[in-house]
Image: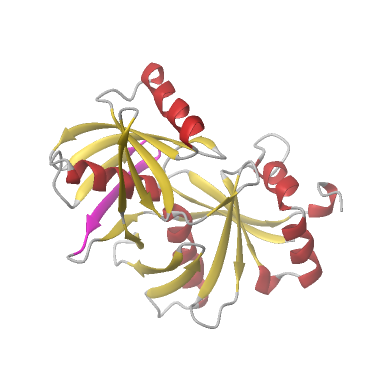
Amino acid sequence: MLFVKMNGLGNDYVFFDSRLNDPKDVSYLEKNIALLAPALSDRHFGIGSDGVVILYPDPGSDIKMRIFNADGSEGMTCGNALRCIGKYLRQSCPDKDRFAVLTEAGVRFLRLNGDGTVSADMGKADYRGCRSGAAFVNVGNPHGVIFGGDVSDTAFGKAEELSLTYDVNAELVSVENRNAFRMRVFERGSGETLACGSGAAAAAYALHLNGMIALPVRVILRGGELTVDMDKDGGMTVTGTAETNYTGEVDIYRYGKT
């Protein structure tokens, strides 16, 4: 199957466009995704990624996406994958700078900016309260935000523990000042990733709600920086770079079983 490998701040995915591949191959990919996503995501024996994204035509939007974590579980949405899709769609529509993408969390809007960055609408954040020392926020995906002040390897174990305990993506944050904070993330189904768009939005919302930062805010991640903002209606937006690593072709039948 034809694929394109893309990343947003090092948060990388293997994208399969169903419009460019044989329907039988797409069906096989879907049927065996629990086996194929881990195999394709393996950084030694596969392509290497944080997960797999399948793109579909959709009559009500520019494209539909389904996203699968590195362990084969399905996610609802992904800020960095969305921003990559914006760059991908721009290749065939060079005069267009706005796109609508249907995700499992609803339609999300993308904007291609003049400086080469891509902004992704993440929808409204839903605050779910505090427990176990973390603020729980849903931004399409469920997140637990730990206000740690320490994002060292030693402290990061708290994020992994929170993620496994509550089945959420877990963010460990350290506020630099009113306009910036550092963040590391442990994503359920993928482990630590270099960046997380929905996690950045969730963390920014939780910090803003607690009066710790102002918006827009700069989020410093291991893979680079995102800017998070919120509009007057409460909609969260993440902005940053996205790029294509390479395109290729992979024999998915070597991995599947049915």
Chosen colour scheme: secondary structure
Residue extending farthest to the top is 154
Q: Does residue 110 sit above or below 151 in this rendering?
A: below
Q: Is residue 229 magenta?
A: yes
Q: Does residue 3 sit above or below 179 in this rendering?
A: below
Return the x and y of residue 157 as percentages of the image width and height: 43, 22
Query: Along the line of sight, which residue is nearer the eye, 98 or 133?
Result: 133
Query: Along the line of sight, which residue is nearer the eye, 88 or 145?
Result: 145
Return the x and y of residue 27 as percentages of the image width and height: 77, 65
Residue occupying the point 25% across, 43% down: 206
Residue occupying the point 68% across, 57% down: 248
Q: Does residue 71 sit above or below 241 in this rendering?
A: above
Query: Along the line of sight, which residue is nearer the eye, 220 or 187?
Result: 187
Count of marks, rendered view: 0
Q: Main secondary structure of the magenta part?
A: strand
- The image quadrant where one finds the N terminus is bottom right
Q: What segment carries the magenta color?
A: 221-231
Residue occupying the point 62% across, 47% down: 73
Image side of residue 239 versus residue 74, left or right? left
Q: Is residue 230 magenta?
A: yes
Residue occupying the point 32% across, 53% down: 126
Return the x and y of residue 20 as percentages of the image width and height: 68, 72
